[in-house]
Amino acid sequence: MRRDGRAGYFPLFETEGRGSSGYKLFAVSIFVGICWIWVYRVSHIPTREEGRWVWLGLFAAEIWFAFYWILTQAVRWNPVHRHTFKDRLSQRYESELPGVDIFVCTADPIIEPPVLVINTVLSVMAYDYPPEKLSVYLSDDGGSDLTFYALLEASRFSKHWIPFSKKFKVEPRSPAAYFSTTSDPHGDAHSTEQWSAIKKMYKDMENRIETTCKLGRIPEDIREEHKGFSEWSSTTTSRNHQSILQILIDGRDPNAVDNEGSALPTLVYLAREKRPQHPHNFKAGAMNALIRVSSEISNGQIILNVDCDMYSNNSESVRDALCFFMDEEKGHDIGFVQFPQSFNNLTKNDLYASSLRIVSEVDLPGFDGYGGPLYIGTGCFHRRVGLFGKKYSNEYKEELKEDAKRRGEESVSSLEERVKGQTNCTYEKNTQWGKQVGLKYGCSVEDVITGLSIQCNGWKSIYFNPPRKGFLGVAPTTLSQSLVQHKRWAEGDLQIFLSKYCPFICGQGKIKPGLQMGYSIYCFWAPCSIPTLYYVAIPSLCLLSGVSLFPKISSPWCIPFLYVITAKFGYGLGESLWFGETIKGWLNEQRMWLMKRTTSYLFAVIDNVLKLLGFSESAFVITTKVADHEASKRYEQEIMEFGSSSPMFTILATLALLQLLSMVGGVIRVVLKKETMVVEALILQFLLCGLLVFINIPIYQALFFRKDKGRLPSSLSFTSFALALLFCLVPLF
């Protein structure tokens, strides 16, 4: 075994740096090519007045792209990777493991079906961890009795599922995921009988929940089963209800055991009070209510939060996280441990580029090399004191070696009534909640500014990406879902840059410059839309006019353009293949990159401008986790889903038609008018336009050839064609 530091010390985790000198030389060569492009732009500014502004606009776009590319190099310069030693953790601290509180957040029983929610709850209840030190809290911001009913059913099923999972070392411990991927296991007759019985039990529970949800109400005979249903009345709505707090499994009760007599984790349902006249601060408000409630009920020193669609895929994730927090030499200043966001419903070629593979495999390890990754809102283990806004100090060095004190002998009903008051709408008034304490308010990506604040308080963070993913979720299955999700992210990240949480302001002197640059990669997602739109549209329109914006193919000045383009995209393709993507998957990633920059990020800029002018307020958009059967089938066949007259689709269709008309017009100019002399000067524009036409093939299919419901509507096709034709006919000069 490896020893580090002082004699006899065996670390609970090790860090491996993978910075490549070869990549650094490659990056330097790209930068040299960029500099030569700048020299060309400056030394070849057109003398004609009418073409000069178009040229300078293109130069400005290239300056922005270079600036943004330099920012992205920060996270590629010093990536680190981690490995844990869970056996050492067990040997030293098995009897001293800290309490862990797990927060699961849901907000809408239609968009986030209760069956999906309880599978996540059951997966984290079944962690390989002492159950008496595990507490699971479900925050239901939809205030739905359907979700409460599903959780009640799950609490009963857990008495069978948890011992079964541990006995047979089930992975993953989401029943739906396990039974959908595992056939009758090979073994003795007794094991097969148990497997079949638990599967039938789960399917019966699933059918009861789905039947109740289809009814849309709880039948009277079921309502009489538990006192908690009395909290709902005919006037209760998702936006107007009192606080509802129910402890479904009381971990301190000696009778709260599974069917084999072992203790069960504590299980709590919470729907914080909501009133139309009071702001509720979306997910951040729900998390802060959970922090307060859990402090009174279980007070675990470690808090894990997961979205309701991100089930546990690795039963040892808690122990992995604790290897970082409890390391005697390097763990005392770690504020949170972030696992990657991974998905179980990706198509073979990742149709909507939802895997975020480069973020997970490149960006976040690069963040870790400068002091830690950003907090991405799910799959993250926190020190409770860090979430409370405490600054790091040496007093926390030995804290996790002892479990926090549990509550006394207070009755469940008394405890529920007392703690409810901390979830009222007015509780946070004139307090520091949402400002200095808990998750921060005022931004649609509250997780990012919360993580940044924790790091600015002196805590480090850790990125851990184990071979078996810690959590698996549901990726968007339609183009609209994906674009809306990225619009929300880009809007919130730009909002951060324009606020007091700008990494170059609040992080100055508190976090490393490389980490500040890393945060800025996402803060500048939205502004990238403007130069991208310019570069996509203007060279193609100039192709129609016969105006050259790039050097002739025979000119030496063409070399830096060709090198930067081919080297960058060639390296990107190789990197994607290295991380397990297909060539078609890489093409899908490039297509989605273009679509997001010209729609999601553009609307993010517009919304931020409107907010700055006082015309709109922040809104949190939940990405739906369900799609109709036909749309799901098209997703599995990797056919892009449009199907509506969204403004985003109008922009995509207009740009695609603009490229097509420009390409056709350029070819006609050369062939019919025999202007072959201009081909050499326009060859790079022909290549750019041709590449864009190729990327937009799914849009042309949706416009002209498809007959299914996922095609683009005829009205949108007409509008987009008219707009594209108008842009082509109106002269630029």
Image (cartoon, grey):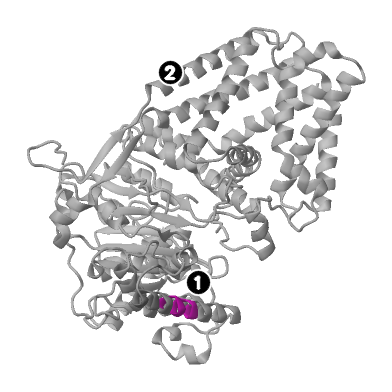
Residue at numbered disc 1:
114
Rendered position, 186 above or below 656: below
Rendered position, 210 above or below 689: below
Residue 318 screen position, x and y as percent: 29, 57
Q: Where the N terminus falls, by quadrant?
A: top left
- Badge 1 density bin: few <14, some 14–19, many ≥20, Cα 10 Å: many
Residue 383 screen position, x and y as percent: 27, 53
Asked if residue 245 can be seen in this view, the reply is: no
The residues bearing labels 2 and 1 have C-alpha atoms spaced at a distance of 52 Å
**Principal secondary structure, stretch drawn in magenta:** helix
Quarter holding residue 540:
top right
- Most foreground residue, 247 or 685: 685
Residue 182 in the figure: left or right of residue 249: right
Task: Give amino acid for label 2.
Answer: Leu
* Circle nearer the N terminus (2, 1): 2
Q: Secondary structure at mark 1?
A: helix
Q: Which residues are magenta?
A: 198-205
Rendered position, 292 above or below 368: below
Q: Is residue 594 magenta?
A: no
Residues at marks 2 and 1 touching, judged by CB atoms closer than 8 Å: no
- Most foreground residue, 577 or 549: 577
Quarter holding residue 529:
top right
Residue 261 screen position, x and y as percent: 24, 80
Residue 415 in the figure: left or right of residue 404: right
Residue at numbered disc 2:
25
Q: Secondary structure at mark 2?
A: helix
Q: Is residue 200 magenta?
A: yes
Residue for point 52% across, 73% down: 240
Residue for point 53% across, 72% down: 238
Residue 36 in the figure: left or right of residue 133: right
- Badge 2 density bin: few <14, some 14–19, many ≥20, Cα 10 Å: few
